[in-house]
Amino acid sequence: MPDSPLAASPYEVLGVAATATDDELRRAYRRRLRQTHPDTGGAALEFDRVQRAWELIGTADARAAYDRGARPASTEDRTWAPAAPRREGTRPAARSHGHPGGWYREQFLVLLHEWVGRGVEVPDPYDPRLLARAPRELRHLLAQAVAEEDTARALATLGIGFTVWHDVRTDGDAAGALRASPQGAGGKIDHVVLGPTGLWAMLSEDWGEPVSVRRGELVGPALARDERPVHELAQRARHFARAARVRFTSLVIVVPDGGTGEGVTSLGSVKGMPALVVERPRLADLVRRGIPGVGIGGTDLFEVRTRVQAAARFV
């Protein structure tokens, strides 16, 4: 999977402390190679991660550069700070409302300053060295913000025939604070997408590890035991659908490239709606093509847009 705020450090991948000696590092690398090699029953993805970790800290110069916060040229252009708005190409973008990732970024910055300590100056809250020391809960907030922003950019390419509402509140309490939940911000849908292929409710996520499907729900080493993202998305969609007097035609969990290894995976029907988990590079094509037998057309499309627009409240 591509780098993310939740990506394990090379020390974590090799199973050693950042203070390990060079000899301890070499022994750990050889041990992890044996454990993860596909010829001995290991997973190719984990084997690749071990080799990548060694490239980052396997030599004295590389390790010193990594410890200083330097990153390879291929990743230096990716910062976790908010990206500047930009237009790609001349094709009209989908109409968009709301602020994708905004709620998670606000929570990240507030809790980061609490974690660092009152009165402590933080010149760059997105400094890789600072993030490497931050608790996983903090890094997950940032990962969720980035995931929403990346999905928003993908949805913008759908074109003028689609309308997207980001960070739509679903708990009916516009004045109160959103509650925390294992699935992130309880009481909101990350993206509501409307077009000729239907009305889609989407949750963007990055757990830092691949996920798989079990009995219509997502599971994985990074998900909490009580985490049920598909069920939670369906509940939120039902709440908003009742308020707006509309019906969602599809549920989608969006994960990073490599997040499932399948591209698009059906989760079956959840509360009467087809549900899928989709790797982000496949998302725009899926929404343009739609699901066979599912869609909205003619005057119905305008009526649904009017109802969603009237009911949408943003976090």
Image: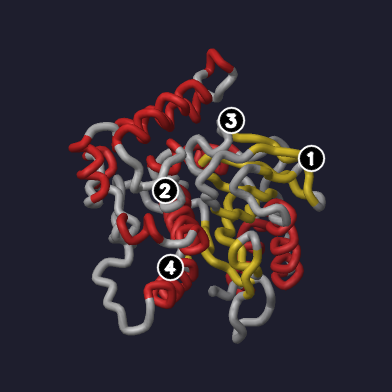
Residue 105 is tagged as 4
Give the residue at mark 3: 262
Mark 4 and mark 3: Cα distance apart in space: 29 Å
At label 2, the amino acid type is Ser
- Of tags 2 and 4, which is closer to the observer? 2
Which callout, 1 or 2, points at the residue further toward the start of the chain? 2
At label 4, the amino acid type is Arg
Is the Cβ of the residue at disc 1 closer than 8 Å to that at disc 3?
no
Give the residue at mark 2: 4
Residue at 67% from the left image edge and 50% from the top image edge = 251
Give the residue at mark 1: 215
Residue at 59% from the left image edge and 30% from the top image edge = 262
- Residue 304 location in percent, x, y? 65, 62
Is the Cβ of the residue at disc 1 closer than 8 Å to that at disc 2?
no
Which callout, 2 or 4, points at the residue further toward the start of the chain? 2
Crowd class of label 2 (few under 14; some 14 to 19; many from 20; radius 10 Å): many
Residue toward you, 163 or 270:
270
- Residue 238 location in percent, x, y? 75, 63
Residue toward you, 160 or 276:
276
At label 1, the amino acid type is Arg
Which callout, 4 or 3, points at the residue further toward the start of the chain? 4
Question: Quick one: which residue is furthest to the bottom in this view?
Answer: 175
Mark 1 and mark 2: Cα distance apart in space: 28 Å
Q: Mark 1: which secondary structure?
A: loop
Crowd class of label 1 (few under 14; some 14 to 19; many from 20; radius 10 Å): few
Please tell me whether residue 171 is drawn above or below residue 5 in the rendered image: below
Mark 2 and mark 4: Cα distance apart in space: 15 Å
